């Protein structure tokens, strides 16, 4: 893997994985709301959030998807890999100031089509909060 290109298809193997950790601050949530336009008060208004079943502000679910995308775009498969699809199941909320760990693990490699399927999980304090599966297009190594 280089700075300009991630792994080539031939470099990948089943069970290969990569992760990224991020403590999500109130400022991160506010920035995400501005960027996405999702101003749901469950994310931004502490008084409102206290009146919900969560009892406090929660991080946007799609913020966790952005962490998954960050792992894919920078580590595995890395630069050059193209997102084709993503499924997500939000199992538990992420609260502000919690540390989320996004992990991608290769579960299938289709060498003929240049496709890699990965489990995409996010954990907080060792508990699964988001699970899913993604498919990426990955280049084959150029022939010289």
Image (tube, rainbow, N blue to C red):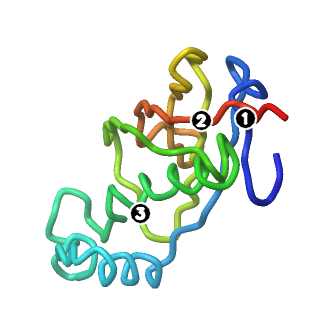
Q: Closer to us: mark 3 or mark 1?
A: 1
Pick the residue in front: 118 or 55: 118
Q: Position of residue 98 (x, y in %)?
A: 53, 62
Q: Is residue 33 left or right of residue 53?
A: right
Q: For residue 100, what is the image quadrant?
A: bottom right
Position of residue 144 relative to residue 116, above or below, is below
Q: Position of residue 92 (x, y in %)?
A: 35, 45
Categorize mark 2 by other alpha carbons within 10 Å: few (<14), some (14-19), many (20+): many
> Label 3's element?
loop
Position of residue 113 relative to residue 2, above or below, is above
Name the residue carrying label 2: 138
Q: Position of residue 142 (x, y in %)?
A: 75, 35
Q: For residue 21, what is the image quadrant?
A: bottom right
Q: Which mark is residue 95?
A: 3
Q: Earlier in the sequence, mark 2 or mark 1?
A: 1
- Position of the C terminus, as image quadrant, is top right
Name the residue carrying label 1: 8
Q: Closer to us: mark 3 or mark 2?
A: 2
> Label 1's element?
loop
Contact (Cβ within 8 Å) of mark 2 with mark 1: yes
């Amino acid at each position: 893997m280089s700075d300009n290109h991630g792994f080539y298809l031939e470099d990948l193997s089943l069970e290969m994985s990569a992760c990224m950790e991020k403590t999500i601050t109130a400022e991160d949530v506010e920035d995400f709301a501005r960027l996405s336009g999702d101003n749901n008060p469950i994310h931004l208004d502490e008084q409102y959030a206290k009146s919900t079943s969560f009892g406090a502000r929660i991080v946007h679910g799609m913020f966790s998807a952005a962490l998954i995308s960050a792992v894919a775009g920078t580590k595995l498969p890395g630069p050059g890999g193209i997102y084709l699809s993503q499924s997500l199941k939000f199992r538990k909320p992420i609260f502000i100031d919690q540390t989320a760990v996004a992990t991608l693990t290769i579960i299938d490699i289709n060498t003929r089509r240049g496709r890699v399927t990965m489990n995409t999980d996010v954990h907080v304090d060792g508990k699964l909060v988001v699970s899913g599966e993604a498919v990426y297009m990955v280049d084959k190594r150029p022939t010289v």
